Image (spheres, rainbow, N blue to C red):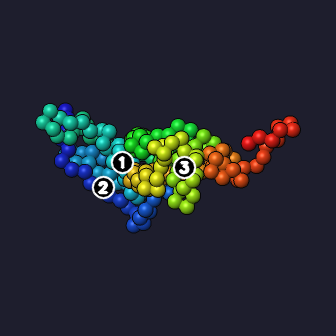
Amino acid sequence: ESRILLSVFILIQSKQCHTYPQLRDDQSYNLTIESSYGIIYAENVWGALNGIETFSQLLFITDDNYLATNASIYIQDWPRFPYRGILLDTARHFLPVPIIKQHLDAMASNKFNVLHWHITDDQSWPFVSETFPQLTEKGAFSSAHVYTPENVQDILEHARLRGIRTIPEFDTPGHVAALGRAFPEFLTDCYNGSMPCQ
């Protein structure tokens, strides 16, 4: 027999408020669903987000458009590993901002908490630097395949609101062929036999 839910209460124990998730944050939560309400108890907001994600996955919509669940539920859950992430390589294969956000949404649904964003490599330099604009002018696949500072802030905020830390990687000092197209003086001559090459 399904139970129609009228409300959910979220109780956060800690008075501390981390603006961004940290590696060692307590991400545990307790979730209880009784008769017509749910309770999520967590130490901090990042655990509460995990509880909300689980809560949303337990619900279905009735024929009358109510949210319901099939039984009383009690879940006590915590992550086994503090770092649960994926590496997204947009240097070798450019991904538009909406696609990156879809990845972040999927990560949140599965309680991943770290996006290792591999932004630059030999193949391209898609990050638009306000100080060195020639990096993308000469290093990106095209002018359409770039991430502006506003794009990056948008992605970081989308991740943060889902409890995901973003680690942007600018691959240096190796893997800088794209950077070298703008600043060839930064590259070291490589000798293969007697012929120098870059």
The amino acid type of the residue labelled 2 equals: Ile
According to the picture, the residue beneath numbered tag 3 turns out to be 137
**Relative to 159, is 192 above or below?**
above
In the displayed structure, does residue 17 sit left or right of residue 127? Answer: left
According to the picture, the residue beneath numbered tag 2 turns out to be 10
The amino acid type of the residue labelled 1 equals: Gly
According to the picture, the residue beneath numbered tag 1 turns out to be 51
Q: Secondary structure at mark 2?
A: strand
Residue contact at pointers 3 and 2, CB within 8 angstroms: no
Q: How far apart in space, not on screen, are marks 1 and 2 (Cα)?
A: 9 Å
Q: How far apart in space, not on screen, are marks 3 and 2 (Cα)?
A: 48 Å
Residue contact at pointers 1 and 2, CB within 8 angstroms: yes
Residue contact at pointers 3 and 1, CB within 8 angstroms: no
Depth check: give the residue in front, 198 or 115. Answer: 198
Residue at image location 35% in from the left, 43% down from the top: 54
In the displayed structure, does residue 125 sit left or right of residue 186? Answer: left
